[in-house]
């Protein structure tokens, strides 16, 4: 995730976290919630998703991360869209040439492609662009970073109508909704937003853990993975209203969030740290990372059965 996160975040002070959050408590929750849910799939919770897919990939020699292939031959972009499979709407923040790849995924009818303006503004700018695309224009407090326009055969910032028959992995979980914000905290659109970096091939198994975590306390502003003592904020689930408020605050000093750190964006939010002993948040920053995770270069994603 080197191209979608600020390296200063690792050594900086973390945002406020929930007191008493322990590995044991999360493990107990996981043990209960990992049982298969009744029926054929997991419940659709009230959340949207943002997939950050617009980094430079400088440590990979400029090879675009969204098109890298897993050991099963699935593009990383499609793995991220699989992980966000239960989201009501998905905003992919990345370049125009991802349009065909987005359209080739089963989630295309509820997925939009957008971009921070100017490009390569960093993860906070990407989150701002994604949230602005997801929220109704009249209600969005986040300054828009780009306007919808036609790219790759369908409108940027709007859903594609291309469909495929490929069925993404089913990460089952109990049929319980995420807690809704109380009173005037409720934000337009979905009350929660999942934020994922595109270069995390194992992220599909992390999303159910995040959903279970935010159910544990209705006062939380979100949850994110922590691996090896390092906060993985770009594998996180956050209250939409809380994230929008922080984006507005950061935007007063940094228009559109360009160059701002994720640590600064999340500062002051009440977040639960979810232990990641299985290293589900491992990302592809270098070719050594890619080899370790079974990731390889591949052709552009195409529609698959």
Image (cartoon, rainbow, N blue to C red):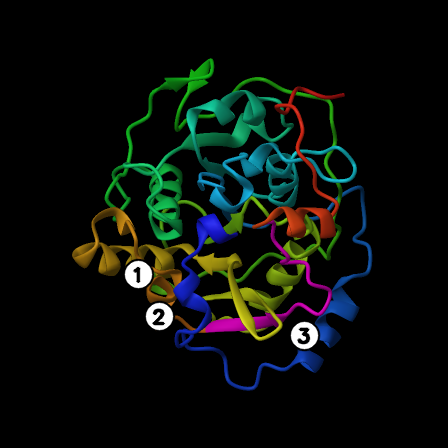
Report which quarter residue 103 is drawn in: top right
* Residue at the far left in the pictured view: 252
* Dot 3 crowding, Cα within 10 Å, few <14, some 14–19, many 20+: some
* Residue matched to label 3: 26
Please give the name of the residue rendered at 52% of the width and 46% of the height, measured from the top-left corner.
59
Image coordinates of residue 111 in percent, x first then y, are: 51, 31
Image coordinates of residue 22 in percent, x first then y, are: 63, 82
Name which of mark 2 and mark 3 comes first in the sequence. Answer: 3
Q: Secondary structure at mark 2?
A: loop
Image coordinates of residue 83 in percent, x first then y, are: 64, 45
Q: Which residues are magenta?
A: 271-284
Residue nearer the viewer, 22 or 122: 122
Circle on res. 267:
2
Name which of mark 3 and mark 1 comes first in the sequence. Answer: 3
Circle on res. 14:
none
Name which of mark 1 and mark 2 comes first in the sequence. Answer: 1
Report which quarter residue 267 is drawn in: bottom left
* Dot 1 crowding, Cα within 10 Å, few <14, some 14–19, many 20+: some
Q: Nearer the viewer, mark 1 or mark 2?
A: 2
Q: Nearer the viewer, mark 2 or mark 3?
A: 2
Q: Check if residue 193 falls in the magenta segment.
A: no
Please give the name of the residue rendered at 75% of the width and 33% of the height, measured from the top-left corner.
73
* Residue matched to label 1: 246
Magenta stretch: dominant SS? loop
Relative height, residue 87 to residue 104 (above, below): below
Q: Is residue 2 left or right of residue 146?
A: right
Image coordinates of residue 13 in percent, x first then y, are: 39, 77
Q: Secondary structure at mark 1?
A: helix
Q: Are marks 1 and 2 in contact (CB under 8 Å)?
A: yes
Residue 19 visible? The answer is yes
Distance CA(mark 3)–CA(mark 1): 27 Å
Residue nearer the viewer, 229 or 2: 2
């Amino acid at each position: 995730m080197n191209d979608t996160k600020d390296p200063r975040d690792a050594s900086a002070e973390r945002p406020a976290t929930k007191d008493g959050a322990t590995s044991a408590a999360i493990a107990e929750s996981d043990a209960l919630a990992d049982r298969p849910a009744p029926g054929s799939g997991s419940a659709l919770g009230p959340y949207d998703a943002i997939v950050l897919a617009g980094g430079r990939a400088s440590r990979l020699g400029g090879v675009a991360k969204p098109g890298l292939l897993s050991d099963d031959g699935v593009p990383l972009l499609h793995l991220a869209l699989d992980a966000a499979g239960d989201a009501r709407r998905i905003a992919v923040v990345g370049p125009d040439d991802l349009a065909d790849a987005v359209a080739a995924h089963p989630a295309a009818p509820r997925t939009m492609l957008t971009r921070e303006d100017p490009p390569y503004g960093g993860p906070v700018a990407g989150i701002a662009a994604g949230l602005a695309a997801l929220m109704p224009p009249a209600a969005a407090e986040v300054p828009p970073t780009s306007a919808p326009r036609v790219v790759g055969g369908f409108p940027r910032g709007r859903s594609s109508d291309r469909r495929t028959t490929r069925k993404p992995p089913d990460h089952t979980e109990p049929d319980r909704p995420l807690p809704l914000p109380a009173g005037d905290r409720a934000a337009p659109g979905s009350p929660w937003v999942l934020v994922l970096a595109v270069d995390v091939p194992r992220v599909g198994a992390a999303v159910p853990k995040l959903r279970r975590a935010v159910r544990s306390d209705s006062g939380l502003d979100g949850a994110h993975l922590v691996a090896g003592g390092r906060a993985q904020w770009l594998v996180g689930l956050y209250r939409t209203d809380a994230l929008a408020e922080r984006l507005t605050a950061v935007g007063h000093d940094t228009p559109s969030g360009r160059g701002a750190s994720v640590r600064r964006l999340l500062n002051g939010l009440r977040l639960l740290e979810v232990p990641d002993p299985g290293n589900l948040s491992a990302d592809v920053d270098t070719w050594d990372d890619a080899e370790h995770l079974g990731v390889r270069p591949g052709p552009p994603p195409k529609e698959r059965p």
